[in-house]
Each structure stands twice: as structure tokens, then as C-alpha cells.
Amino acid sequence: MDGLLIGDKVTGGSGAVLRSINPADGLTNYEIAGANAADIDRAATLAQQAVRDAGWRKQKPHERARLLSRIADAIAANGEALARQQMIENGKVLAECRAQAASAAATFRYYAAACETMEAETPPARGNYFGQTVYEPYGVIVAITPWNSPLTMEAQKIAPALAAGNAVLLKPSEITSGVGLIVARLALEAGLPPGLLQVLPGNGRETGTALVNHDAVRMISFTGGTGTGRAIAAVAALRLIPAALELGGKSPNIVFADADLDAAIEGVIGGIFEATGQSCVAGSRLFVQRAIYSSFVERIAAAARGLRPGLPESSGAQIGPLASFAQRERVESFVASAREEGGQVLAGGQRPADQALQAGAFYLPTVIDGLSGAATVCREEIFGPVLAVLPFDGEDDLIAQVNESVYGLACGLWTADYKRAWRVARAIEAGTVWINTYKQLSIAAPFGGFKQSGIGREKGLSGLRLYQQAKSLYWGLDG
Ligand code: NDP
């Protein structure tokens, strides 16, 4: 199958061959050859021409908005095909894939509206001149994405980058190459000029490295693991180009004794086990106040045991497979390390027995107790359905434990005391804090990480500014 989109053509690549495997049944979806340096060169030249082309540079924001709205419509009209493509590539349950296709369309709509309302600034003059600050595109952007949610994550980069007037070279994860290709074809059909959105699948080593090092690339927008983010940041530092980094997490979910415990159970279970734990904001560390620790943890373990694993397409499935067999092995090795370090597995800790699931990369929702915060599964991002539970006494003890993590992506907080919620929410080092809820996400709110969870904020108007650089103009009024 041809998997690259260069200019306005779907074409074969000249790089390493990628095989897409459906993690629900182990069968091959397709094989494509990824992009090599020569493919990237061709696409980068076309992208440069497309951004320099007066037609695109001079388009008024409201005209770009119209185009983005048409892309949103095309995504919405093809939502089912997009959802199914993501489902066969990463195994996410169909209901969630459908919701993510709708969210991708909404993202394009949001940035169409942002385009319409984008403003320049007039800073107060300090002399006899009129001052103006305008925001201009960088030019060619490379967007690199992971495999867990290509539908939403790619839209979150492509829509604002185009809205800001850039051209985008998209490199999806080698596990999920297909979604971006469909979106790019829809964008072309909706009238996006060729060269402004091109898709270059391939592995990180060959394609990713060549892209971030390409001279034409003026900015990098990356979502993925912290280790990869660090390597990309090093390239960006040498090249002196900006890099926006959305990285990993080890997010805490905190339950105080006075919380609505039924709501907290639901939030904690959904927070970690939705998407089979493969979410950057997964609430993978559960902190429970000591007074209710045993009874609450027992209820969490029972709820985890009650979740139904199933084939992604089946309507009753609450837990799909992991996105790849390698990812399941990774999860299994983390659970083995927890056992070696003295943890007690209260739920899961193994593959499901159901015969219908044996060919897939399934793993049961797992709850682990009896470890200290220093244990491997309490420190490292697992990116799988594994919840580590820890007790805390008071607020100071809690905040010290929570902030010990090198990560700072998100946090959930369950309490009936709003003053305490305010104190704790402000003390936690995280880019998003949910109070008596979890995993609510809005395209209108900035999203990103503190500490090693990233640099920069996607979404909202900051997500548009990410792809623009300020230029200040001074209009002299003397003489
Ligand atoms: P990786 O960091 O392994 O890969 C992410 C992307 O980077 C892939 O497209 C990968 O290519 C590419 N890549 C790998 N090495 C390089 C390189 N040297 N130069 C350029 N590109 C490279 O992450 P995963 O795909 O495994 O995704 C899981 C990670 O993503 C988790 O850590 C998770 O927390 C994080 N994530 C963060 C989110 C956030 O918003 N903060 C959201 C979702 C996920 P390929 O895989 O094709 O080799």
C-alpha cells in the first residue's frame, strides 16, 4: 500500500517497511514503505513553496477559517471510517474512536473560529510613533505524534498550525500511519492547497530524525515519550528552532476521606483504565487518605475486576487490547518488577482467560498495593492498565509525595472541602488539575506539562500562538 502524501499525491516511500498489525487479533492490516531522506526533501521543498506562495500567505484569516471549517465538515462526514482506521491500528474501543473522530472535527472548527477572531496588538507608545505587534507563521512545521490517539493529537497540531499560516509535515507513529493519511486526503479534497499538509510515515530513527534535522523545518511540535522529547529538544537546541513538547506523565488521583466516594471510584477507574491505560494523563498513582484506605482500595480492586475486556468493536467492551504486543510485554515487565519489589497485586496482573481474546494483546486491569513511592511502578510511566495505590495522612505529606515525581502532566483531586481543593490544586506541580472529576478535556483550554512532562501549551489560543512568532512594527509619526 502507498502510505505517503507528498504534494497532492499518495505515493510509495523509499524508507524502511512498516507493518501495521491489528492488536485485537494479531493480523496484518497493511504494509507500507516509510519516508526516507529523499522523500522528506521532496516534501519539504513543496512545503516551502506552499508557504511562500502568495496565495496562502496573503489569504485573510477569515478565508483560512472557511477552509478549516470545510476540513472539519469532511472529518465529521468521514468520522466512521476514521474511527475504524484508528481502531484497527491501535485497538482502542470503537466508541472511544468515534468520540475522538468527533473531537478532531471540533478541533478544526475551534481553530477556524480562532482564525476569524485573531487580533494584532497595539502596545502603548513610548514616543512619537504608532506601535503594532502582529503574529506571523514560522513556515514549515514538523508534527510528530505517538500511537495512542492519532485522531485527536494530529488534529491538535495540524489545525492551529494551518490556522496560523504554516505548512505541516506530519510524521505519525509507525504503529498508526493510516489516520493522518486519510485526514490529509480529506483536507486536499476540501480545497487545502497541495504542500500545506503532507504525511510522511516512517520510524523515528530514520524518518523522525531526518525531519527534525531538515533545514527547511522551522519549528517542531512533538507529542510522545520524555526520552524521545529530550533527544528532539537537543536537536532543536543545536538548530536554534523552537520545539513544543507534550511528554509523558505519572499523574496522581487523590481521594480525601470526605469525598463523594462513589463518584471518586468512577473517576479513578475511568482515569486509569480508559484507553487501557494508554493515555498521557492516565491517573496511574492513586493516593488515598489513610482513614479510608483499606475500604476504598478494596472497592477500587473490585471495580477493576468488574471491567469487561473485549474486542474493540463489541459494544460491551470496556477494555480493549494494548496497542501492540511489544507494549503488552512492557506492561508485563513492569508488573513483574512490582512483584519483585514486594507489591501485592489486588486485581489483574495477568492476561484474560477468555478464548476469544487470546490472539490479541489484552491485559487485565491491574491494581497494585503495598509499595512505597520509590518503587518502579510508582515512578515510571507504564502506559498501560496498571494502578499503583499509596496511602497519605495530611496535606503536607500528600503534596510532598505527589510532587516527588519528575512528571507534572495532570492530577485528580476528590474532596468535599473547596478550600482544601483550592490549596492542594495550587500546590500540585501539574499542567491540569481536575477537582471532583477526571479527564475532562476541552480544546479551548491550554494543555501541557510541568517539569519533565513537557514544554509549551497546546489547545486554546495558546495552541495557536505556539505556531506563530511575534513581529513588532513601529510607524514613525514625526515630521
Ligand atoms: P515515542 O516517544 O516513542 O514516539 C513518539 C513519536 O516520535 C513517534 O512518531 C516516533 O516514531 C517518533 N520518534 C521516535 N524517536 C524519534 C527521534 N529520535 N526523532 C524524531 N522522532 C522520533 O512515544 P510513543 O509513540 O511510544 O507514545 C507514548 C508516549 O507518548 C508516552 O510516553 C506518552 O506519555 C506520550 N504521550 C504524551 C501526550 C501528551 O500530550 N503529553 C499525549 C499522548 C502520549 P516511531 O514510533 O514511528 O518510531
Image: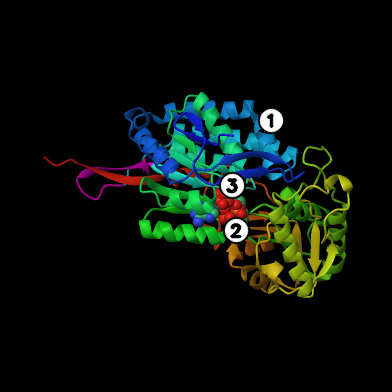
Q: Nearer the viewer, mark 3 or mark 2?
A: 3
Magenta residue check for 50? no
Horizontally, residue 238 falls left or right of residue 295, namely: left
Query: Residue reaching furthest left?
Result: 479
x, y percentage for residue 443? Answer: 58, 42
Name the foreground residue: 182 vs 27.
27
Q: CA distance from mark 3 to mark 2?
A: 18 Å
Quadrant assignment for the C terminus = top left
Residue indicated by mark 1 = 80
- Image: magenta residue range: 124-139
Identify the residue at image location x=76%, y=73%. 371
Q: Callout 1: helix, strand or loop?
A: helix
Identify the residue at image location x=58%, y=39%. 32
Above-or-below relation of 128 to 413 = above
How many badges with numbers are in the image? 3
Residue indicated by mark 3 = 174
Residue indicated by mark 2 = 248
**Label 1 or label 3, whichever comes before in sequence order:** 1
Q: How busy is the neighbourhood of tag 3: few (under 14 within 10 Å), some, or many (20 plus)?
A: many
Q: Check disc 3 and give the amino acid type.
A: Glu
Name the foreground residue: 98 vs 13.
13
**Label 3 or label 2, whichever comes before in sequence order:** 3
Q: Callout 3: helix, strand or loop?
A: loop
Q: How busy is the neighbourhood of tag 2: few (under 14 within 10 Å), some, or many (20 plus)?
A: many
x, y percentage for residue 245? Answer: 51, 54
Does mark 2's beta carbon lie closer than 8 Å to ligand 1? yes
What mark, if any, has residue 5 been given in the picture?
Answer: none
Q: Check disc 2 and give the amino acid type.
A: Gly
Q: How busy is the neighbourhood of tag 1: few (under 14 within 10 Å), some, or many (20 plus)?
A: some
Quadrant in the picture for residue 101: top right
Above-or-below relation of 465 to 284 = above
